[in-house]
Image (cartoon, rainbow, N blue to C red):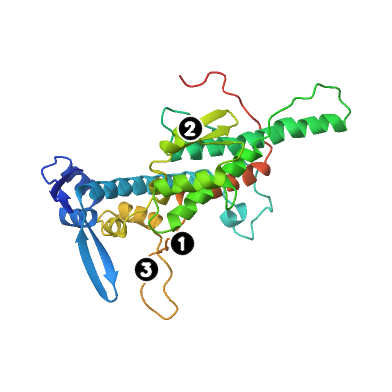
Amino acid sequence: LTFNSLSADESEIDRENPHLEPVLSLMGFTAENLNRALCYFSIVAGKEKHTRSLPKQKAEKGTEALIKATYGALFTYLVQRINASITLKDEKSQRGSRGSSGKTKAATIGVLDIFGFESFKVNSFEQLCINYCNEALQQQFNLFVLKKEQEEYEREGIQWSFISFPENQDVLDLIDKKGSGILNILDDQCRAPGTTDKTFANDIYQKCTGHTRFEANFRQVGARQFGVHHYAGTVEYDTEGFVEKNRDELPKEATELLLSSTNEFVKKLANIISPPTAAPTGGGSRGRKAASAGTRVTVGGQFSRQLQELRKKIDLTSPHYVRCLKPND
């Protein structure tokens, strides 16, 4: 999709774009609804609703958010369908309570593909999340394979040369500690009004400088960058885009557009993005879940929560690690 700029604060969908018709057909939209959702936004003041136009750049940002949200919902849908199809069904529910053999659910095997640390010429929010995950899983590996095994050797009186390994809890604290971790500082910035990447950078310089794993020299501060001394080495991050990526806001007009689709599958994706709430007790129609800036889950917050859940799940299993003998070229 492309847009034409009508003025400094107004734009419209480029209807001459040959890709427009296939998009409308696949998504079940009309050109008018698509244009209204991406090129305009509404604000409610009291009992009055006002519609304002958007400049070309913001319309393009809204399109990117819509694409990302739709892709994310599609991914969630596929994972749910795959898990539902391969998960062992409870025998009792399949055969009924009368014919149940009383067997317990069989053991399961899960495969976790651990991606490696990332360090590019320019590292952003995505690389911080990936490297944070690797730090957490590396700690899990150290505790399970090295520390626990060696403790067992000591209990059994086995003679061996102690293998020392670096502890990386301080790196995890730098990233996710409540109140002073980089992701927590970023979340606070995203909840406050009028914050930018600059205010986020200044906040981490103020709160994280002095941490042994944090780096921010004069050059980095001037460029609004910072470094983290990870388990695998130092990675320098550029704060540009951190606040926007962590908020990951989808305009409500975009959600309403998906719900207006004539394609039932697209509507299903819309319900994954914004599940309907239950009807109020006093009557009324079902609405959509709406979160305020203070309660909305950020990308970093969601990522951190899912990582903690993953670690708890691993703790309940007996992990077996397979080292990649030939990494991807």
Between circles 3 and 1, the one closer to the viewer is 1
Between circles 1 and 2, the one closer to the viewer is 2
Residue at 49% x, 55% y is: 188
Q: Which mark is residue 294?
A: 1
Instruction: Looking at the image, tell me whether mark 3 or mark 2 is earlier in sequence order.
Output: 2
Q: Which mark is residue 84?
A: none
Between circles 3 and 2, the one closer to the viewer is 2
Name the amino acid, label 2: Glu
Q: Are marks 3 and 2 in contact (CB under 8 Å)?
A: no
Can residue 9 be seen from the camera position used here? yes
Residue at 61% x, 52% y is: 91
> Would you say 329 lies left or right of 13 here?
right
Q: Are marks 1 and 2 in contact (CB under 8 Å)?
A: no
**Distance from label 3 to label 2 (Cα)?**
44 Å
Q: Position of residue 95 (x, y in %)?
A: 59, 55
As drawn, 227 above or below 72: above
Q: Which mark is residue 287?
A: 3
> Would you say 107 lies left or right of 117 here?
right
As drawn, 149 above or below 296: above
Q: Which mark is residue 236?
A: 2
The crowd level at tag 3 (other Cα within 10 Å; few <14, some 14-19, many 20+) is: few
The crowd level at tag 1 (other Cα within 10 Å; few <14, some 14-19, many 20+) is: few
Name the amino acid, label 3: Gly
Can residue 77 be seen from the camera position used here? no
* Front residue of this view, candidates 99 and 326: 326
Q: Quadrant of the C terminus?
A: top left
Looking at this view, name the residue that lies furthest to the front. Answer: 218
* Front residue of this view, candidates 8 and 135: 8
Q: Locate residue 163: give its quadrant.
A: top right
